[in-house]
């Protein structure tokens, strides 16, 4: 019996992505895997049922049937408790899992002794780069954030010399120069804006400058473990705010992307800093989902204060659903190569370093300590 990989339609509100695109489905089929797709799964990302059928996948209308047939269920958003209740014994799900938020789903997987791999937990080692879904999706978010900022901004981004006079380029400030921030810098530069950026990791300066932007030096290096940032001390926070305040006041568009994994997003733009911005300026807060980098951000909304728009977009990768699905799907394909052996069978045990790091729950046990602590804290 071949391994069955199944892809249900995403049902989470606003989610337009699909976990598997027809191209990748075809590769899986060629490798001896059976692929089942719920009818309409790719519609919102513009992949038709027909394209999946041509790729050799079985397209089925029966949602419950697709989920219950899966040896490996592929998803974008964490599986719902209902989907989990349909999974067959021994089933595996590979998805973004929201390890500190989707506690009901993780608990349901644990109680049914199913296995859940979290794409958020794939380690950032060289071999795993091809599976790094956080990066592939952050890239999309960074790109989209600039388009949103440009559209809301009443100014041209590029410098223009016209018969009616010369237009000065817009000033874009990017706060947080990780994957999303670097893509935002590159995109804003392509549109012709003058870009400044900063990050608490001083090493980001070189990457920022190589994209043609100015790096704001803060004399702080907050590089933590694993390439991520550590939290700043109280003193460092004061210094940072003082230095950043002027840069914010001077920006036509500020794009904030700062995050510290597993924590609430750091507050970078206070209310009084927004008050110093010119009317017509725009803040696009990519950290809206994890608490916001700006004090005034409301997730999923645009707040206008003294003519300054504070935009808190949610799930930007979903907006560019065609390409974000394509990239995510490639990440999953590479991940599946670790789970399904060359003989077409499931690899026993999860001993590979990448699998061991990303297995969130298996065999009735939550493996990821922060999630385990949260579940214990809530007495679940
Ligand atoms: N395979 C790999 O080696 C690999 C893969 C992806 C990313 N990375 C690296 O990991 C790092 C973080 O990536 P990410 O984009 O996922 O990070 P992230 O989404 O966790 O954070 C975004 C950025 O916010 C910054 N930040 C945090 N607190 C801040 C503050 N108070 N003020 C300003 N900036 C703040 C972080 O330094 C980071 O650059 C980057 O250096 C990236 O290049 C490595």
Image: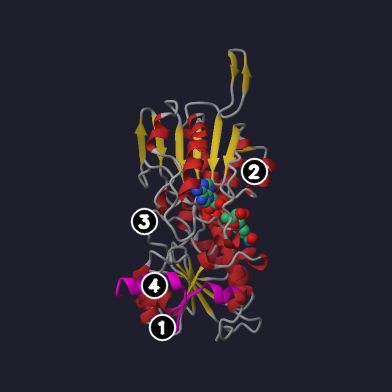
Nearer the N terminus, badge 4 or badge 2?
2
Nearer the N terminus, badge 1 or badge 3?
3
Q: From the viewer's side, name the closer residue of 127 and 27.
A: 127
Nearer the N terminus, badge 1 or badge 2?
2
Query: In 3D space, how far apart are the residues under numbered discs 1 and 3 (Cα atoms)?
Result: 29 Å
Q: Which residues are magenta?
A: 354-380
Label 1 or label 2, whichever lies nearer to me, is: 2
Residue most extreme to the top: 164
Q: Which residue is mark 2?
A: 208
Nearer the N terminus, badge 2 or badge 3?
3
Q: Which residue is mark 1?
A: 364
Query: In 3D space, how far apart are the residues under numbered discs 4 and 2 (Cα atoms)?
Result: 37 Å
Question: Element under label 1?
Answer: loop
Q: Residues within 10 Å of mark 1 (few under 14, many from 20)?
A: some
Left or right of residue 79, residue 33 in this image: right
Query: At x 42% / y 55%, what residue is drawn?
Result: 264
Label 1 or label 3, whichever lies nearer to me, is: 1
Query: At x 47% / y 67%, what residue is drawn?
Result: 75
Q: Which residue is mark 4?
A: 373
Query: In 3D space, how far apart are the residues under numbered discs 1 and 4 (Cα atoms)?
Result: 15 Å
Q: Which residue is mark 3?
A: 13
Q: Residues within 10 Å of mark 4 (few under 14, many from 20)?
A: few
Question: Element under label 4?
Answer: helix
């Amino acid at each position: 019996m071949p391994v069955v990989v199944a892809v249900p339609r995403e049902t989470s509100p606003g989610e337009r992505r699909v976990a598997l695109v027809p191209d990748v489905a075809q590769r899986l089929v060629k490798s001896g895997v059976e692929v089942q797709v719920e009818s309409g799964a790719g519609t919102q990302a513009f992949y038709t049922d027909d394209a999946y059928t041509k790729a050799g996948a079985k397209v089925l209308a029966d949602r419950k049937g697709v989920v219950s047939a899966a040896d490996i269920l592929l998803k974008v958003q964490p599986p719902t408790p209902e989907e989990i209740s349909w999974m067959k014994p021994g089933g595996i799900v590979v998805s973004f899992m929201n390890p500190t938020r989707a506690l009901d789903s993780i608990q349901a997987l644990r109680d049914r002794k199913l296995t859940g791999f979290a794409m958020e937990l794939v380690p950032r080692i060289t071999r795993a780069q091809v599976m790094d879904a956080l990066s592939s999706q952050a890239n999309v978010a960074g790109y989209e954030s600039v388009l949103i900022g440009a559209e809301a901004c009443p100014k041209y981004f590029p410098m223009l010399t016209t018969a009616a006079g010369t237009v000065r380029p817009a000033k874009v400030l990017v706060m947080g120069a990780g994957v999303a921030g670097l893509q935002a810098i590159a995109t804003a530069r392509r549109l012709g804006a003058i870009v400044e950026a900063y990050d608490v990791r001083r090493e980001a300066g070189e990457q920022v400058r190589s994209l043609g932007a100015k790096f704001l030096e803060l004399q702080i290096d907050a590089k933590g473990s694993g390439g991520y940032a550590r939290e700043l001390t109280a003193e460092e926070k004061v210094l940072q705010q003082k230095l950043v305040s002027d840069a914010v006041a001077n920006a036509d568009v500020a794009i904030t992307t700062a995050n510290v994994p597993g924590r609430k997003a750091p507050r970078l733009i206070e209310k009084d800093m927004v008050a110093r911005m010119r009317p017509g300026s725009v803040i696009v807060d990519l950290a809206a989902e994890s608490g916001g980098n700006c004090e005034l951000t409301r997730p999923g909304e645009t707040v206008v204060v003294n003519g300054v728009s504070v935009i808190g977009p949610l799930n930007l990768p979903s907006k560019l659903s065609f390409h974000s699905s394509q990239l995510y799907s490639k990440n999953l394909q590479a991940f599946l190569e670790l789970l399904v052996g060359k003989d077409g069978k499931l690899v026993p045990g999860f001993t590979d370093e990448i699998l061991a790091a990303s297995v969130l729950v298996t065999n009735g046990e939550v493996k990821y300590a922060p999630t385990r602590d949260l579940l214990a804290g809530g007495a679940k």
